[in-house]
Amino acid sequence: MIFKSLIAGGGYKILGGLYLGWGIGANDSANIFGTAVATNVIRYSTAIILIAIFVIIGSMVEGPDLYENMTFSSAEATSNLALAATLAAALTVTLVTFLSIPTSTSQAAIGAFMGIAIASSGVASVEWNKFIKMLICWIVNPIACIIIGIILLKTIGDLISKTVKSQMARDQIYKFGLIIFGCYGAYALGANNVVVTTAPYYHAGMFGPVGSKAAFWAATVGGISIAIGALTYSRKVMATIGKKITPLSPFSALIVVMTHSLALHFFTWLKIPVSSSQAVVGAVIGVGIYHGAKTINKKTMAKIFAGWFITPLIAGLLAFGFFYVFGA
């Protein structure tokens, strides 16, 4: 049934969504195991295999819950519009990934969806209240992660120092913690971000009649594309997250991954896709502030913030232009 629906709707058009999913895996994998790889706790090859497995699980289990909420206008969704939106977002993500900037894939996708919504139905018919709600969550996300990261550094650090006296035992705790929360982070990434890869195709009916079954298949396909991105092109951005913002110890790396994973899963419960990159960068900044603001690489931070600002803008403009190229 799923394959018949894809073929009937012009199955090749879903390549835009798969390309976007690849970009998520290539860019956002760094947010999950970048700190662990940088601190030599886990090998890169092991990290990407774990990411691939758990991102698919998260996509299949909780990802479908976000699909109904991912529309921004009353205009009828079509496969051509879906292709225009996802291709615009994917091209934007590819550009910033090539520049080794941890960008916001979800913001690129939402920017593209908004560009299509404005082009197809006009500014007045866009559901701005839904977009503003997401915008608020995007702002809260990194700020909350800074605060949570500092709190966890203090509370968990004190707990471990009081209860675990052996440095060898502490190192083992950090190692297993990074692996466990890395897997959890991959699960949360799939659950939260998979919706932006195939939601337009879902609403266009390319996975069958709109409903839970179609959402499941859409999320599964999107999750697989994210996994492929992690497996093929994630090493460069991992270096930026793990080494170039602020120096991280294994314990600090664990706190970063914990904070990122908890934040991402929290917004999944709210059914709002947020930036995995903003969550992890917020957590890393929290570590830098806790250990002294001078440890933060301000040049790298400026590069990352610029990427966050221009990503949805570029994606939105590209999508607006693609609307007239691909048509409705």
Image (cartoon, rainbow, N blue to C red):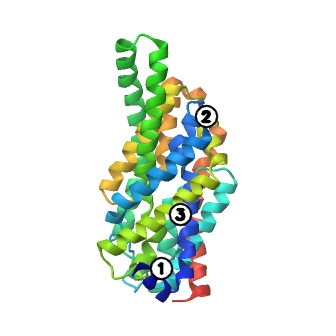
Contact flag, marks 1 and 3 (Cβ < 8 Å): no
Foreground residue among 261 and 175: 175
Tell me: residue 193, above or below residue 305: below
Residue drawn at point x = 62 percent, y = 65 percent? 92
Of the residues shown, which amino acid type is indicated by label 3?
Ser
Q: Amino acid at mark 2?
A: Ala
Q: Is residue 96 above or below residue 257?
A: below
Q: Secondary structure at mark 3?
A: helix
Residue at mark 1: 118
Lateral position of residue 53 relative to residue 241, left or right: left
How far from the left and from the top, in percent, is residue 286?
A: 47, 33
In this rendering, the label closer to the viewer, 2 or 1: 2
Mark 2 crowdedness (10 Å alpha carbons): few <14, some 14-19, many ≥20? many
Q: Is residue 143 visible?
A: no
Dot placed on the residue nearer the N-terminal end, 1 or 3: 1
Residue at the outermost top position? 165
For marks 2 and 1 on the same chain, the one whose residue lies earlier in the sequence = 2
Secondary element at tag 2:
helix
Task: Identify residue type, mark 1.
Answer: Ile
The residues tagged by marks 3 and 2 sit, at their Cα atoms, a distance apart of 25 Å
Q: Earlier in the sequence, mark 3 or mark 2?
A: 2
Which circle marks residue 38 in the picture?
Answer: 2
- Gap between marks 1 and 3, in whole Å? 28 Å
Residue 89 location in percent, x, y? 56, 68
Q: State the SS at label 1.
A: helix
**Of circles 3 and 2, which is in front?**
3
Q: Identify the image quadrant of residue 319.
A: bottom right
Question: Would you name the residue on which mark 3 appears?
Answer: 225
Q: Residue 215, image x and y in percent? A: 36, 71
Is residue 100 shown above or below 64?
above
Residue drawn at x 50%, y 44% as measured from the top left: 32
